[in-house]
Image: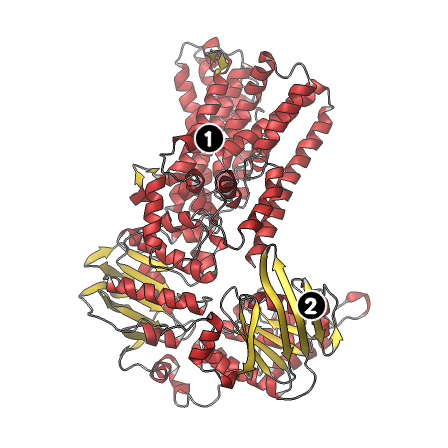
Amino acid sequence: MTLDKNATPASGQPTEPATGQPTGPATDESAATNGEPAAGGQPGTAAEKEVLGLGALLGRGFGGLPVLVLLVLGLSLATDTFLTGTNLDNLGRQVSIYAIIAIGQLLVILTAGIDLSVGSVVGLSGVIAAKAVFDTAGSGPVLLAVVLALLVGAAVGLLNGVLVAILKMPPFIVTLGTLGMARGLTLLYTDGRTIQPLPRSFTQIAGGEFLGVANLIWLTVLIALLVGFGLRRTIWGRYIYAVGSNPESARLTGVPVNAVLLSVYALSGMLAALGGILLASRLGNGVPTAGTGYELQAIAACVIGGASLFGARGSALGALVGALIVGLLNNGGTLLGIDPFWLQVAIGALILVAVGVDQLQGRRLVRRGA
Amino acid sequence: MSSDDPVVRLRGVTKAYGPVTALEDVDLDLLPGEVHCLAGENGAGKSTLIKVLTGAVARDRGEYQVAGRALGSRPSPVETRDAGIGVVYQELSLLPDLSVLDNLTMGRFPRRLFGIVDRGAQRRAAQDHLDRVGLGDLDLTQPVRALPTATRQLVEIARVLGTEAKLVIFDEPTTALSEREAAALLDRVGALRDAGHTVLYVTHRLEEMFEVGDRVTVLRDGRVVATRPVAEYDHDSLIQAMVGRPVQNLYPGVRHEIGPPRLEVRGLRIAGFAAPVDLTVGRGEIVGLAGLLGAGRSEIVRAVFGADPVQGGQVKVDGVRVPAGSPRAAARHGVALVTEDRKESGLLLQLSIEANVSIASLGQVSSGSVLRGSRERRHVEQAVGGLRLKYGSFGDPVTSLSGGNQQKVLLARWLATGAKVLLLDEPTKGVDVGAKADIYQAIAEMARNGLAVLVVSSYLPELLGLCDRIVVVREREIVGELPAAEATEEKILRLTSPPTSAADLSAPMPAQAPLESR
């Protein structure tokens, strides 16, 4: 996302990049504080800044970036093992799969929806890819297996999208249904058994490196950049925020609301499928229960990264940072020898703090508007 | 007017939101048995003043007395209610799914032992409240949702009276009412005064203040400019007091040539309409749609835009047929709709001013589908130019704007698309006087540039001042048409009202009248 800012054609307007990104008051104001203060004399400007003070403190609106920096600093100082190549590589690999799924989830959340089926799609696509390479014993093209699994993920997403957009069913219920269906189909397909061993050509997808950095990490960064660009700099992205803000207003403005919804659910399914393929590749086997509970991890990452479940607020960078924060807490906890049960408590509390800050901010903005 | 002690007395009341002072040193005396009007532009502090009176917000400084008894510095809404302050809200505060009965006694259920509701007592109390507003024969078991807006309003008034209110505050009560229903409501307000209640009446419609008000307090920028008998003002001097500068004629005045038909609606079959709808609007022409609330005006503009499905007929723009039932197709063919409810079906509240303006014309500011930031900025600046939009920066959230400026954003959104036909549903609802004039100017300017404009409004002076021609809708049918030169409020009212009561419009409306239009 920061790359985008630099890439914006210079126009002599320091606030330009921020206005291209409709993520609400906090981001816009942050840009104003960096450059010159927002146009003076306007009532409310100062009040917003005051609101921002609280938000900035906890990293809202920056997608949790300050929290992330603090965590990294803290862990670097507190342990000798954190800032080592092996640990960072390990951390990157762990976080990548979560982050990819979270970015898909974010697209849905931006439209004020939710996709509970992603965890099951991880399992389903993982075993489909695993089975395809297992049956051909690695002689068949791995690419075909990957494409097949991605298509299955997209198909589940598309089904979600059709039910939500065209039949107007609530996203929570729709994806709760497909969560059960996809998991059941996975177990039926595998008879509940793990598929292994998988050929090296397949495990290399996640295991391989490029320029000394794991493929997984490259892929995650690439996806975050692509989705970030799509959200901030394309018509499609703007339409997603519009639909999330108010679908009826969007429809009456000529936004193709159904097409937007179909696209985000399909993409969420496809990115979950990618996560599933990478997980199977990383583990070296296709586990039918893989991905259980990942939907909640993904939602947590989005929310910690500044997304609002009411839609129209959040960014791809935020989802990535959110996933990193959760990953760092887990990783750091292990390094520091903290009881993993307490870590769960901490991550849960972090979600409440993140959403609580949002609420406070929202309430103050409303009061100001009165 | 009585010289008794005031029912409500405010002295030096000040309220600030952060650095923004909403009220400064406000003194107000509300006397027994008077209708006291509160006048001021949006943002002048009217809403805050009401909130201070009801305890919705705490004042920072100043005294607040009800019937000579001082209230604490942070009275709660329950305390102010018990002290005798009742409010009829702009957005009705009834619970739509509960019955009339439950709504009337909500929060004050007559109880027996163990908290069991005494249905008999509840029913008697509710009936008593309804009788007072002339709704004696309303079915108590109906859910409020099933009632027409005007009737709901009366139920709300009945509810407020049921709290034994010493002061009844009306906050923009006629916004959602038709001309006729509003007249009935004003009679009701007069009756309350005659029964000895004190009324604080807040409205944007100046005519109503002259009709029903005894005294008026004018607020400007949070300060009281004057408190005087209404009779000492006339229309222009009151506006001048509110705005702080003389305002020329609100309406744009001189009209010009009307060109060939631009919007042609032929045999449009709309759900619930007995007959197909035919309408033509010429280039540069402004046509008004008049009618009672629920007569089908909004349905017509929504059907033309394709917002709701239609069962047949066609819409043409410059002779080109617009595919039915798709707002996207309508927008592409140059049709634009600004709906009645900005927040529900117009604005994208989480997005910036800029994103709200450009959303309908993103294709014009992108290469392929990639947005060009600086091109978008220029495009938005151009669309907003001439609308006198008051804003901080384009990146600010659209919610930072006042109602009138939000409406301008919606106009700019469609101006930016290069629309040919503009459909406006209540374009000045909840908009203050200064912004109203700007919006009228903008509409006239668009017409001058060749747009065909169709305006729905419940505010007759607006239609008369703005339109070249007025089409009247009654009970889901177009029943007549009047050229601007011949139209008068009375002629329009005669057409909008059902034939049975059209015979005697000058007589006071019975309070039950709104029920007939159900």
Judged by depth in the image, the label closer to the viewer, 1 or 2, is 2
Q: Are marks 1 and 2 on the same chain?
A: no
Where, quadrant-wise, is the C terminus of chain A in this rendering?
bottom right
* Amino acid on which the number 1 mark rests in the picture: Thr
**In the rendered image, which residue does mark 2 sit on?**
B62
Q: Colour scheme used in the picture?
A: secondary structure
**Nearest the eye: A38 or A100:** A38
**In the rendered image, which residue does mark 1 sit on?**
A2
> Which type of secondary structure does the marked residue at label 1 adopt?
helix
Could you tell me residue B55's position as x and y percent? 67, 65
Residue at (29% x, 57% y) in the render: B335
Q: CA distance from mark 1 to mark 2?
A: 50 Å
For the question of whether residue B11 can be seen, the reply is yes
Residue B299 position (above or below residue A86): below
Q: Quadrant of residue A347?
A: top right
Residue at (75% x, 72% y) in the render: B70
- Callout 2: residue from which chain? B
For the question of whether residue B271 can be seen, the reply is no
- Callout 1: residue from which chain? A
Could you tell me residue A175's position as x and y percent? 52, 39
* Amino acid on which the number 2 mark rests in the picture: Gly
Residue B352 position (above or below residue A124): below
